[in-house]
Image (spheres, rainbow, N blue to C red):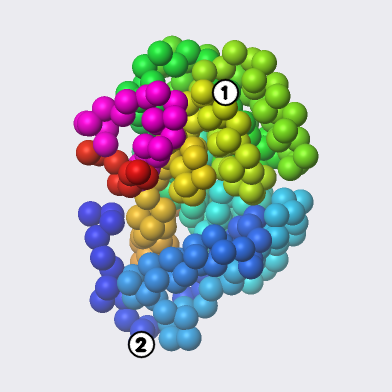
Amino acid sequence: MLARPFAGRAQSTGPVRRIAWLSPSVETATVTQQGAALVRESLRKAGYEEGKNLVIEFRFAEGQLDRLPALANELVRLKPEVIVAYTNDAIAAARRATRSIPIVMAFGTEPVEAGFIESFARPGGNVTGTVWASSEYMGKVFEFVKEVAPSTKWLAFLANPTVAATSGPGYATAVNRAASTFGIAFLPFDVARADDVAAALDRIAASGADALFVATDPITVAKFGEIAAFALKRKLVTIGTAPQFANPGGLLYCGPDVPELITRTISYVDRILRGARPADLPVEMPTHFFVTINLRTARALGITIPQSLLLRADEVIQ
């Protein structure tokens, strides 16, 4: 129901609606531009179009998280009807800036633990929306890991702790909880700068890990080739949550369907503009997961991927 098309549900002849979008991202980055295009397309399908019945106030922190509070306050002064906050850093900044304007989470992480909502079913305040990562979602990732490599016992977690949404403490907690339910020990390795990666890989090599989970952030994305080559040399099973992870040699990518999640995020904007209260709109987790398997890497590792898993994969790299 929540993902159904919205075309025709709002009319361009109605009042002009004003929404805000707050993000820590770099505005000119390709992935940011692609995301903005998906947002506009989802809004158009919901019946809202810039230049007709919609104004969108975009604000990007350009990767400088300390800019988010000022940008959030700036948006609040513009009095939008809804603020869409992308990832935890932006959500936290928006929530500090206002407790009255509805805030829609886009790609949140562990929102109860972060203090954004009271519960998934009853958020209770001015925040609701979609979740990118949680213990439940990570559990699905580790189901795939155990199917691919059932003997996995020690998991190295390579992440940038300063990027809250995709690498930080909340995300790490979700990965750790999920891994522990599958009997996998969690070994964190931090990379806050590009220069940290080589030393972190050396420590992983000495740790006895038999699998490597690569969290997504600009540093690790730029080093995927180096990380994949290291993992192949050390015979480590590799898991990533960026769509491009498997291409340079990562074994397994498993992550939410981004277009679907954006569509569902925009459905919250639509319902709030129609009078719904954030406190009454249950928070949603991803329902569809995109899976990519690199068979070349599997063969190099001496792993046979079960046919049942290959049939469930959205993409197989031969």
Q: Nearer the viewer, residue 220 or 2?
A: 220
Q: Earlier in the sequence, mark 1 or mark 2?
A: 2
When the figure is inspected, residue 20 is found, relative to residue 224, above or below; the finding is below
Q: Which mark is residue 13?
A: 2
- Residue visible at 48% across and 13% down in the picture: 153
Q: Position of residue 240 (x, y in %)?
A: 49, 37
Identity of the amino acid at label 2? Thr
Amino acid type for the residue under numbered disc 1: Arg
Image quarter of the N terminus: bottom left
Q: Which region shows up in magenta?
A: 286-310
Please report the residue visible at 75 percent of the width from the left and 29 percent of the height from the top: 199
* Whole-percent x, y for residue 189 in the image: 66, 26
Dividing the image into 4 quarters, which one contains the C terminus?
top left
Q: Position of residue 123 (x, y in %)?
A: 44, 42
Residue 173 shows in this picture: no
Q: Which residue is mark 1?
A: 234
Q: Is residue 291 magenta?
A: yes
Mark 2: give few (<14), some (14-19) or many (20+) Cα within 10 Å: few
Left or right of 152? Residue 203 is right
Looking at the image, is 24 positioned above or below residue 156?
below
Q: Nearer the viewer, residue 60 or 72?
A: 60
CA distance for labels 1 and 2: 61 Å
